[in-house]
Structure formats: structure tokens, C-alpha cells
Image (spheres, rainbow, N blue to C red):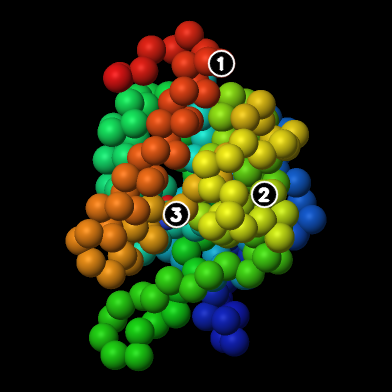
Amino acid sequence: MRSRNPSTDRYPLDHCGPRRAPTDPAPHTTNLAKLRDAAAICQACDLWKNATQTVFGEGKTAATVMFVGEQPGDQEDRKGHPFVGPAGRILDQALAEAGIERTAVYVTNVVKHFKWSPAERGKRRIHKKPRYSEIQACRPWLDAELNAVKPQVLVCLGASAAQGLLGRDFRVTQQRGKLIESSLAPYVMATVHPSSILRAQDDQSRHSQMQAFVQDLKQVARLLRASTQLPLSA
Ligand code: URA
């Protein structure tokens, strides 16, 4: 009879499926469903240990724009879908205001497991910023998504995504909304993370930060119009 390892309280790994070594690349396929299945058992860094599940990107292979955030949040971790919590609602609202069809969009994160620590009191799970090494360990999945979707426009949401993909010196505060030369996609841009708008100190600054975010997304909409024939909603 198989028994748990007493020090980890887990069954041995051969019972749980194959272990992915940190250097294992994602499978060579452009099939997003196969990539999602493979990522579901990823243990390339330690973040899988405290997360409920891998949260892979979502959207069609034919999506023309890819938005890349930092990592799933509490609700995304529970539900298994990216950008379905409060930050996702801000993103959806800004996309609608900018006239970008949700069907043209693929959303994902540079890190696909929720990194958190328990609140000092209560049951809340507090978001923790991923380390650069964790972003790098997760990178094969993002590269596989880019290879599968081949978006015309790649948008990094916030510093973790921008620094993970465009270099550690990248400063969203200085370079937001500007086109960045990169081999990752024909057009590459960074803007703020929608959760920064949720943290605004008062209604007035929340409103002006949202307007600035929408302006950046309108720039994305213009790039999409210029580079594709796909209809936009406004
Ligand atoms: N924040 C992110 O960066 N990604 C999500 O999926 C949700 C919140």
C-alpha cells in the first residue's frame, strides 16, 4: 500500500505525475489546450506548493493583442482563470472604453501561480511580489503562449511583467504608453497594472489614473486598427 511521505505529507511524486525540472522547456506545440495541460503540473519553481492551481492564459489563438500581468490574484487562484477578480474588472472596463473587443484579446501573466502569505490576523491571503528568478522559471510558458498566439501587439501590465519581459531596468513610470523595440511582437508597450488604479487614494485620482490607462489602451486600439483588419467595437 502507498503511503504519504511523513515529512511532506504528500504522496511521492511518481504518484502525482511527472515532475518538471526548472530547465524543462514547455512542450513544443502551438496548441494552447496542450500547453495549459502541461503547465497544470509545472513545478519549475516552488510557487506551486502554496497555490491552488496553475492559472494559464486565456483567449483565442487568433487574438491580435496579448496583455501580460504579474501573477494570478486570490480570486484567479481559486477560480483558475486570469483577470477575473477586481483588477480584471478594471481591465475589462478600460478595454470597453478604449473600444477593444474582448475576443481580440489574450490575457496571461508572467507568473502562473499565486504567491501569497497569510495575513497576520484573519484568513486573508496577502499578495507577494514574485522574485525575478520565479518570473524566469515561468518564462517558457509565456514564450510558448507568444509562439502560439503571435499577437500583433503585446502589452505589459505593470513593473513585474515589463521588467520580466523588457529588462530589469525598465521603468513603467517613464516609459508607459511608448512603443518599445522588441523581438517579442511587432508592437510592444507597457502600461500600469490595473490593480494600481484600485489602490488610488481617492476618487479623483482613481478617475484620472483610469483615464490615463484608457488613453494607453486607445493607443493599443490604434495599433490594432493599423495592423489588422479585425473590427473593433468603437
Ligand atoms: N493581477 C494579475 O497580474 N493577473 C491576474 O490574473 C489578476 C490580477
- Depth check, front residue: 217 or 11: 217
Residue 129, given in percent of the width and then of the height, sits at 53, 70
The residue at label 1 has a CB less than 8 Å from ligand 1? no
Q: What residue type is labelled 2?
A: Leu
Quadrant position of residue 6 = bottom right
Q: Tell me the residue at 28%/81% (across/down).
A: 123
Q: Tell me the residue at 57%/81% (across/down).
A: 8
The residue indicated by pointer 3 is 193
In three-dimensional space, the C-alpha distance between marks 2 and 3, rounded to whole angstroms, equals 15 Å
- Depth check, front residue: 198 or 210: 210
The residue indicated by pointer 1 is 227
Q: Label 2's element? A: helix
The residue at label 3 has a CB less than 8 Å from ligand 1? yes
Q: How crowded is mark 1: few (under 14 residues within 10 Å), some or many (20 or more)?
A: some
Q: Label 1's element? A: helix
Q: Which mark is residue 165?
A: 2
**Residue furthest bottom as drawn:** 120
**Dividing the image into four equal quarters, which quarter contains ligand 1?**
bottom left
